[in-house]
Image (cartoon, rainbow, N blue to C red):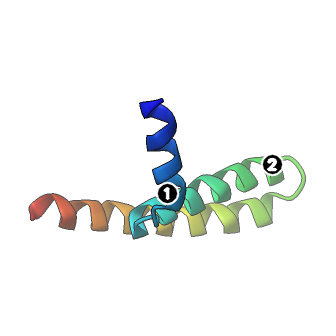
């Protein structure tokens, strides 16, 4: 019962910037992997985008840990 309430609350909770970036990073990495066999050029482009997002995640995580 308690777990159900926690899950219900988490449905309405807004995601933090880092959580949104992690979701985007995961999506881009999956997409890059799927494209790697068909179109390596697009795959590399998407992978570079994912790398930029990963760097931003690291930067924001370091900022948050310093506080």
Residue shown at 82%/54% (left/top)? 35
Question: Can you say whether 12 is above or below 1 in the image?
Answer: below
In front: mark 1 or mark 2?
1
Q: Nearer the viewer, residue 37 or 2?
A: 2
Question: Can you say whether 39 is above or below 36 in the image?
Answer: below
Residue shown at 69%/62% (left/top)? 44
Gap between marks 1 and 2, in whole Å? Answer: 18 Å
**Left or right position of 62 against 21:** left
For the C terminus, the quadrant is bottom left
The residue beneath circle 2 is 34
**Label 2 crowding class (10 Å Cα cut-off): few <14, some 14-19, many 20+?**
few
Q: Which residue sits furthest top? A: 1
**Left or right position of 25 against 39:** left
**Left or right position of 52 against 26:** left
The residue beneath circle 1 is 22
First in residue order: circle 1 vs circle 2: 1
Residue shown at 85%/46% (left/top)? 37
- Image disc number at residue 5: none
Dot 2: element: helix
Residue shown at 80%/57% (left/top)? 40
Q: Nearer the viewer, residue 26 or 4?
A: 4
Q: Which residue sits furthest right? A: 38
Coordinates of residue 34 in the picture (x, y in percent)? 80, 48
Coordinates of residue 4 in the picture (x, y in percent)? 52, 36
């Amino acid at each position: 019962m308690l777990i159900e309430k926690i899950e219900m609350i988490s449905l309405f909770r807004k995601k933090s910037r880092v959580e949104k970036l992690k979701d985007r990073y995961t999506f881009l990495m999956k997409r890059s992997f799927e494209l790697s066999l068909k179109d390596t050029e697009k795959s590399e482009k998407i992978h570079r985008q994912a790398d930029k997002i990963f760097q931003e995640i690291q930067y924001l995580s370091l900022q948050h840990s310093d506080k």
